[in-house]
Image (cartoon, rainbow, N blue to C red):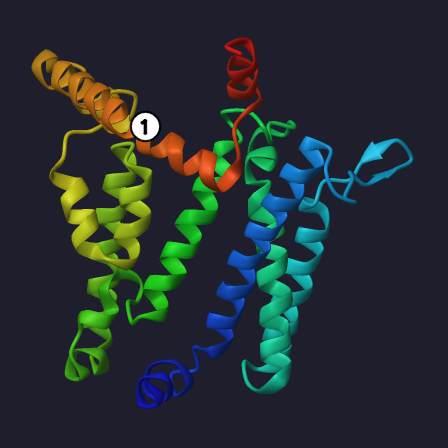
Amino acid sequence: MGDWWQRNIVEPGKLPLLIALTAFVLTFLITRVVTRLIRAGKGPFGNISAGGVHIHHVVPGVVLTVVGGFGAVASGGHGFGASACAVVFGIGAGLLLDEFALVLHLDDVYWTEAGRKSVEAVVLTAALVGLVLVGFAPFGVNDLSDEELQDRGSVISTVVVNFLIALAVLSKGKIKLAVFGVIVPFVALFGLVRVARPDSPWARRLYRRRPRARAKAVLRAYHHDRRWAGPRRVLGDWLGGKTDAELMRASDHR
């Protein structure tokens, strides 16, 4: 275990990244516990206001992310300073992405269905950083041999091809596959051969005069959304808490 830690984490300089990821995940989990306690009226916690304005935790999140990011650059990525900045950055990123949906919608949608985007953003970020920690690199660069890495043309062509594939998958409306495809190119290839979502730019442009393809896209999207609606809701309830609408329905049934 010690050899693995030294070889895969310490020597490649990934310790600050691991520290940042740990701080990020713990901050998100603690924040969700605190906000659920505030919502239930339990514990010593409460909302913070200044001058009649509710200060959302995305505000200190932005400040800490900026401080931690610039501090990490200034520290050179080594020593205690880099680790301390990684903690600050991870905490800030956790607070920031916990209210990602509020920033996206510019509205307080924290306890609504739209607020579930925050949970998805956190899970997606943690998964991507985890992949980088275990050895994956963006655009398949880690799959190149030592000789190919010395050839600048091979590196550039690999990055460009994988970037274009991920971009094509994104245009098909498959956002998660496109994002994961940046780290794991095979995932992007899988998304590339799949039918586009009916509301995507790809479908609007290429399926416009192909009624069969358009009908297939609608049917595939319907079955996909129906299949994953249950697991997605369970994960969202477990990590983020039930929405206001769900709590109202539950109270009406009592």
**Left or right, 195 with reference to 142:** left
Looking at the image, which residue is at 53% across and 12% down?
254
Q: Nearer the viewer, residue 210 or 128?
A: 128
Looking at the image, which residue is at 58% across and 21% down?
244
Looking at the image, which residue is at 58% across and 70% down?
86
Can you identify the residue that label 1 sits on? 230
Task: Give the answer, above or below, for where 194 lies relative to 190.
Answer: above
Q: Nearer the viewer, residue 254 or 177?
A: 254
Task: Give the answer, above or below, for where 11 lies relative to 179.
Answer: below
- Find residue 2 and report its horizontal and vertical position in percent: 36, 89
**Left or right, 114 with reference to 63:** left
Quadrant showing the N terminus: bottom left
Q: Nearer the viewer, residue 1 or 131?
A: 1
Dot 1 amino acid type = Gly
**Left or right, 94 with reference to 200:** right
- Find residue 150 and report its horizontal and vertical position in percent: 22, 83
Task: Give the answer, above or below, for where 52 lies relative to 187.
Answer: above
- Which image quadrant is residue 136 in? bottom left
**Left or right, 19 with reference to 49:** left
